[in-house]
Amino acid sequence: MKLSNGVEWALHCCVSLSQTEHPVPTLRLAELHDVPPAYLAKHLQALARAGVVRSTQGQDGGYTLTRPAAEITMLDVVAAIDGPAPFFRCTEIRRRGPLAADPARCANRCPVARAMGAAELAWRAALGTVTIAELATDIDAASGGDALVGVRDWLREH
């Protein structure tokens, strides 16, 4: 499974937005994370459509989280960016080719599809247990405890 770069960017943006109550413009978020503004804007719009962030227009406009960071999961962000569709789609390859299985023997889901479905459920369950607030705490701890202070200061100064 391969996630788009937008997932990483959106997660970092949500962590950054969790550090301020004021709207943050796309250009500031793009500058903070050194990512292309137009591409980031597309992902922020996807987050807004999914109800993860809110867009405010005007001179002091930008993006804010729609609810507390402790109520937004990594899965919410992944689904907003890469969509809710399953990552694996069974094409019933076992029914094709010179040794194709008789359709009557294929009444149950393919073992490959079952295994991939179970793996996806576990993956989604794991992402559903990690909130943006917890992710922010972990990012801060991994940086020696000063990453979030830096983000808050940078957003306040700019």
Image: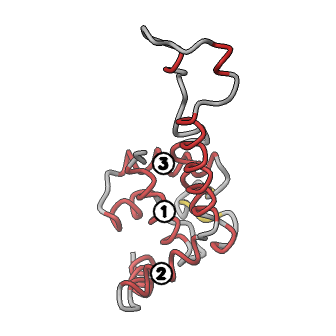
The residue under label 1 is: 11
Left or right: 150 in relation to 56: left
Of badges 2 and 1, the one in the foreground is 2
Task: Relative to 153, say whether 119 is above or below.
Answer: above
Question: Which residue reaches farthest left?
Answer: 34
Instruction: Locate residue 157, reporting x and y percent.
Output: 40, 80
The residue under label 2 is: 138
Of badges 3 and 2, the one in the foreground is 2
Q: Amino acid at mark 3?
A: His
Q: State the separation of the CA atoms marked 2 and 1.
A: 13 Å
Instruction: Locate residue 112, reporting x and y percent.
Output: 52, 36
Is disc 1 placed on a helix, strand or loop? helix
Instruction: Locate residue 57, reporting x and y percent.
Output: 59, 54
Left or right: 57 in relation to 141: right
Q: Earlier in the sequence, mark 3 or mark 2?
A: 3
Q: Which label belongs to residue 43?
A: 3
- Marks 2 and 1 in Cβ contact (< 8 Å): no
Of badges 1 and 3, the one in the foreground is 1
Q: Which label belongs to residue 80?
A: none
Task: Relative to 29, say whether 44 is above or below.
Answer: above
Q: Earlier in the sequence, mark 2 or mark 1?
A: 1
Residue toward you, 156 or 141: 141
Q: Amino acid at mark 2?
A: Asp
Instruction: Locate residue 17, reporting x and y percent.
Output: 53, 70
Identify the residue at horizontal 48%, vertical 48% (top origin).
Answer: 43
Q: State the separation of the CA atoms marked 1 and 3.
A: 10 Å
Identify the residue at horizontal 29%, vertical 62% (top origin).
Answer: 34
